[in-house]
Amino acid sequence: MYGDEGLLDGIGTWRKPDVTFDAHAEVDLGTIVPGHGPIGDGHQAIDWLIRYLERLRDDVRSLHAAGHSMLDTVRRCPSPFADGLEADLLAALDQYEGDTDDISKSYLTLCRDLHRLNVLATYLTLT
């Protein structure tokens, strides 16, 4: 994480989420404005997020069950951002003012860092 794996040593507990969605959640959305990234179709964004979190949970559980350490799990857990950003996300980022190549690279870095944090948080729920 940002080149300082020692940061992980100080994490002992994680705050539980205020709201939990599952596959049966009914949400009437038109447009979503995320905390990170471009505005987009609400249903598409929520569907992608649920699929991502379910896959993340399954991957982390498998690695944990196989006896991998927390840091090894962070390194081994597949990232949906390993090959870059999806084409529709890149197109949305192209709408931003400024150097769109720099914006896309920065957003990719953010997504990869947040994925590692998600792996870490998920792993800690299993210990």
Image: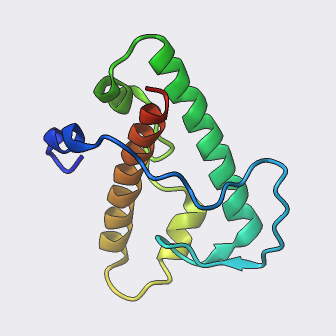
Viewed as shown, does residue 88 lie left or right of 31? left
Viewed as shown, does residue 3 lie left or right of 86? left
Foreground pick, 109 / 55: 55
Query: Which residue is drawn at the image coordinates 48% and 56% (left, top)?
Result: 85
Q: Position of residue 88 (x, y in %)?
A: 60, 64
Counting every numbered tag in the picture gives 0
Q: Position of residue 60 (x, y in %)?
A: 50, 28
- State whether residue 45 is above or below residue 76: below
User: On the image, which quarter does residue 87 sit in?
Assistant: bottom right
Query: Which residue is drawn at the image coordinates 67% and 45% (left, top)?
Result: 51
Q: Position of residue 59 (x, y in %)?
A: 54, 27
- State whether residue 20 is above or below residue 104: above
User: On the image, which quarter does residue 6 sit in?
Assistant: top left
Q: Residue furthest bottom?
A: 97
- State whether residue 106 is above or below residue 54: below
Task: Check the picture and name the quadrant holding the C terminus.
Answer: top left
Q: Position of residue 118 (x, y in %)?
A: 45, 45
Q: How is the image coloured?
A: rainbow
Foreground pick, 101 / 120: 120
